[in-house]
Image (cartoon, helix red, strand yellow):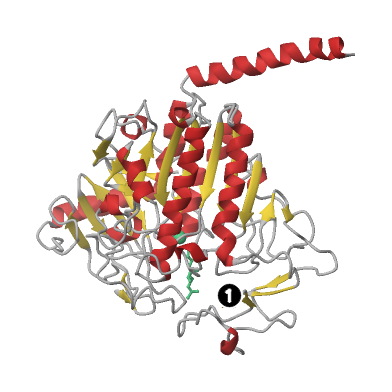
Amino acid sequence: MNKINLKKILPLLFALTYTVTFAQKNGKPNVIYIYADDLGYGDLSCYGATKIKTPNLDRLAASGIRFTDGHATSATCTPSRYALMTGTYPWRKKGTGILPGDAALIIPTDKTTLPNLFKKAGYKTAIIGKWHLGLGEQVEKNWNENIKPGPNEVGFDYSFIFPATADRVPTIFLENHKVVALDTNDPITVNYQKKVGTDPTGKEHPELLKLQSSTNQGHNQTIVNGIGRIGYMSGGKIARWVDEELSTTFLAKAQQFIDNNHKNPFFLYFALTEPHVPRMPATMFRGKSGLGLRGDAILQLDWTIGEVMKQLKALKIDKNTLIVFTSDNGPVLDDGYQDEAVTKLNGHNPAGQFRGGKYSVLEGGTRVPFILSWPGTVKPQVSEALVSQMDLMASFSKLIKQPIPDGDAPDSENLLEAFLGRSTSGRTVFVEHAGTLAIIKNGWKYISPSKGAAYDQLVGIETGNSIEPQLYNLKEDKSEKHNLANQYPTLVNELKDLLTTVKQKE
Ligand code: NG6
Ligand code: CA
């Protein structure tokens, strides 16, 4: 019996070992893409923060490339994530704005995506963390059954996610197609139009809240774990997450995935929720930053990444693992809860020297920390190349030698040389997206006129909107202080036309 089994197994073992070594020798490193949520350019000490220390991310940056002109495509979450997954500017497609927690899947299941590119190349792929790209075929779905299509249908072999944002219902985890800890005797109902069930809401019962909602910013519907959410839910009492455990839960799942797959190439999309609202870090980080819960959440984020780095080292795969760390949009202080982010800011500059932040077409909206580390292969350096997260698809396609079929990922540029630190040239043209669009070429930035408010009172952020055209020389005026549109009308027209051309591209 034993002999027969051995005969069967040995060739398989050989094949497996061969695949692993072959893949590794052929430049197929493990890839971990770590996405922070609402982390600003100035939030890390390696990017100039002095009021907060992020030693683990500083170490990661020192071991690889710290990009100073790295971007999300958009100043909010869903569109930036859409671009990352599809290599397409999100403003090309309707319905890619911030999604409610019950939205249907917006990522096509029949096109090349970042994860299925890796999967085709023989990688094991996983997403752990925040999804926010919709689930199922429609809004009306039964959360108590298998929910699909979702991450597993767009290329992830394994998924452990929460559906939207930490401030939106349903406040549950999904492992592959199922709600974790689902109880058939306590079915889950979700509604974004009207109250369901008998759970108290923040609006009716503010005295039950451990974190007060900000005035006029919603976040006062169903209360879960003492926090008012956007949207209503009922049922699923034991399935509901505890905010203080979100991060360690995702970390544990990520470590499990890395452990299980450390002998074959893997791609892990680790989508953390810090420092997005509601900021509810674990007790061990409370009060540690001196900047309130937002700062504490950043310390938790930094610690989490340190834990992953330690694990890679212990498994001896640190040199064969490429890590990208970045954020889905710029920073915001008051995004719906009174959590002392504003009152305890203590002179900290979440967007660094840049103007604007989340929701803004100014640099603070999309220019974010962007670190790439691949010890032993990529030389430590600071790079000024203009790169975007959307470009990782075309670049990784070259790295892992897995071509993208014509027509897919149309806006993703192959910047592999810049990403590996072998070239300082990145994109020549890039479109930034918030309430309006801006286009950058050779260090000049043109912002399309728009009627939106110039200042978002609710969140206290300059949006960059103006009915006048704006032109900034980013090389000399990083903080976009001097609008030079009147001085250079020809350049304004040139960039305006270029933006029209990019928009018309199929
Ligand atoms: C906004 C929410 C904000 C946050 C954001 C999504 C209000 C007033 N504000 O609409 O709290 O949830 O959406 O953030 O509802 S993102 O990073 O996922 O894009
Ligand atoms: Ca975000």
Residue depicted at 45% across the width and 58% down the height: 300
Q: Position of residue 138 (x, y in %)?
A: 69, 60
- Residue 154, located in which quarter of the rendered image? top right
Which residue is label 1 attached to?
229
The secondary element bearing badge 1 is classed as loop
Which residue is situated farthest in the left direction here? 487
Q: Identify whether 463 is placed above or below 445.
A: below
Residue depicted at 77% across the width and 53% down the height: 146
Type of amino acid at the residue the image marks with label 1: Arg
Q: Nearer the viewer, residue 451 or 370?
A: 370
Residue depicted at 44% across the width and 79% down the height: 338
Left or right: 121 as drawn, with respect to 387: right
Q: Identify whether 63 is placed above or below 328.
A: above
Can residue 261 be seen in this snapshot?
yes
* Neighbours of disc 1 within 10 Å: few (<14), some (14-19), many (20+): many
Left or right: 342 as drawn, with respect to 284: left
Residue depicted at 48% across the width and 68% down the height: 279
Q: Identify whether 111 is placed above or below 181.
A: above
- Residue 143, located in which quarter of the rendered image? bottom right
Q: Quadrant of the N terminus?
A: top right
Left or right: 202 as drawn, with respect to 365: right
Q: Nearer the viewer, residue 6 or 169?
A: 6
Q: Position of residue 473 (x, y in %)?
A: 16, 54
Q: Position of residue 506 (x, y in %)?
A: 45, 43
